[in-house]
Image: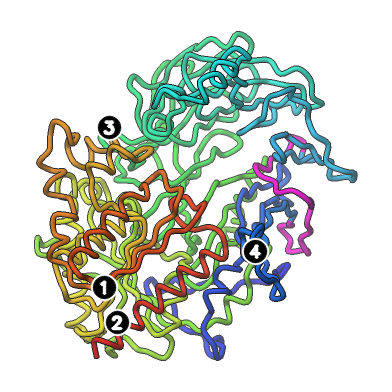
Amino acid sequence: MSAHSPLARVATAAIVFALAAGAARAFPPTAHEIAALDRPGGLRLSPDGERLIYLLTTHDYDPAASYDPADDLAGWTSDRQLWLAFTDGREPRQLTFGEKVSHPRWSPDGERIAFLRDGQIHVLLLAGGEAEPVATGDLEPGAFAWSPDGARFAFLATPPLPTERKEEKWANGGVETYGEEWRNDVLYVVPATGGEPRAVYQGPKHVVDFTWSPDGRRFAVLLSESSDPYYTYSLRVPAIIDAETGQIVRELAGEPRGVDNLRWSPDGRYVAYATGIGTLSLMNTLRVHDLEAGVFHDATEGMDATIYGFVWHPDGDCIYAHIVEKTRSALYRLCPAGTKREKLEYVDRVLSGTLTIDADARRLAALSSTPFDPHTPTVFDLKKERYSIPVNLNEHADRWPRGEVRIVSWTNPEGVEIEGLLMLPPDRDYGEPGVLMVVPHGGPDSVTMQSWSSWTRYFSSRGYAVLRPNYRGGLGYGFEFYAANRGRLGEIEFADIESGVDHLLAENVAHADSLVYGGWSWGGYITDWTIGHTDRYAAAVSGASVSDPVSGYALSDINRGVAAEWEYKGNPWFETGQFDESAPWRWFSEVSTPTLVLHGENDRRVPLAQSVILYRALRDAGVPVTFYVYPREPHGPREPAHVEHYLTVWAQWYDRWLTESE
């Protein structure tokens, strides 16, 4: 890792990122190098705005490693430690060693840092010394926060099972009542020096998230019916509770819905949060509750917004919000009453993660990236209206060969303009035909932005022009665009994407006989749908796809209930039509495209059975198919040996069938 290096700002000439002379190196990145990239997270700006803390996940490989049945990571080691960086660009330094850490938080005075390790809160004094654990009895804290005076911690934890319940479960061999044994998290407070935790709120609802009021006398909380992921993800109620009694003082919404990013104003008068009005997952409204007046305002009034995060200005007169605008990030300064807004024009990188601001509103920080620069801490100087990169992670990636990136647009069969990002291989110009790889994003409620994509960099450097289309049903293009695929899943995405491929063929960007396709999650669903409706692709890769919406509804951790009512306009038991019409498996008998299937063994979002259905169907149909299952993995491989493997076999699959189609 390079400690720090000024990162050249990406030209904003709007659409094209040009290849800087001499920036390329001789060889493209290998799958091994992609798997070994450092990954930052947990970024927080200090109260004085001079320092940053962030987590850095690293992956290292021992070339001397040999077979060891006890080594699940196949010679790799992974670590996640806390780092300190400086906004003036001084050399960063590692703060923690040993076991992995998470959830770093500055103390209000900026002299201490708290984090989680081994199921305990630890406090590190920056002046020196070892991190000290905070005693919390038999509770293992999850999310936690300093009190405004720095004297206490509030944290969420699941209370241990009562002894009689443990004995009962032991006596029956651990039998569980399916779907009825979710255990709610309780909100606790404990002295910062440790001690006996005090339960603040312990039901009947599950506490999803919380934040202290500035005076420390209240909490704003997100509550759900239970800790079942379906409820915690989609059906939340924001509320205010008394920090002493735990009583709910006020609920801020009438019905549970998607709610995120609870934030108190600095004076404690307002509570703001992002929510979706008339949507499932699109956060299109920044609602600000005036607790004194008992009314609320829409800070995004008149905007057809996609909100990815926000933070209050320290004096409370405005809010800085991260709004997605098509393929770009935008920072807006919003009036809480929704009467005024201003766009910050010096943001030309795509932001990710939490926005964090200092106590004097001089600086705002977030992770950011470009198509050629992986995610790295970024500081926005709100006074001088510019940004800086205080620590340039993965600096070596800047030397990988790169080609042109441009936004391409076309008109679909219904006359709607659709966009996509196209990354060309090095030394290949637009209009020079070659292999085209189509990669639809997941979701479908997601969006492809001008940010870092390991897949795109890997395949484009291998000679593929990579098209990532922003089809209808995704975010960043307004409500109408987001809602367009309701009840028309598969049909909408296919029409939007295939018309884009037709456009690029007409633009001479690709040969009709050198097209390949592949995606993950909902991108896998679209892959399954596509190979059942056209044979124009030489090869396809389907990762963690939804091949059968009915079993997907029944088995997924969150994709049921309100999710299905939005996407399919019903549920599979009573409104069967949309589920039947949107099921890729209905067309598997028509598939002839050689297909590689990839899936994580422990995927709860899209369970493994979905890919088993695809594999069995293609085998029965005599279609060339190979199926890899990644042990221990959730909804997407994370272990570096698995990342290296799936990138390698993905590329080999395309190479094989493109060669055979010649």
Q: Amino acid at mark 1?
A: Pro
Eye-nearest disc, 2 or 4: 2
The numbered mark at residue 624 is: 1
Eye-nearest disc, 4 or 1: 1
Of 96 and 100, the residue lying toward us? 100
User: In the image, 250: left or right of 217?
Assistant: left
Q: Secondary structure at mark 4?
A: strand
Q: Earlier in the sequence, mark 3 or mark 1?
A: 3
> What residue lies at 46% left-to-right and 14% top-to-bottom?
250
Q: Earlier in the sequence, mark 2 or mark 3?
A: 3
Is 222 situated above or below 646?
A: above
Magenta-colored stretch includes residue 165: no
Residues drawn in magenta: 85-109
* Residue receiving disc 4: 59
Q: CA distance from mark 2 to mark 4?
A: 32 Å
* Whether residue 280 is visible: yes
Dots 3, 1 in contact, CB < 8 A = no
Q: Residue 416 appears at what percent x and percent y?
A: 15, 60
* Residue receiving disc 3: 561
Q: Residue 337 appears at what percent x and percent y?
A: 41, 32
Q: Earlier in the sequence, mark 4 or mark 1?
A: 4
Q: Amino acid at mark 2?
A: Trp
User: In the image, 584: left or right of 191?
Assistant: left
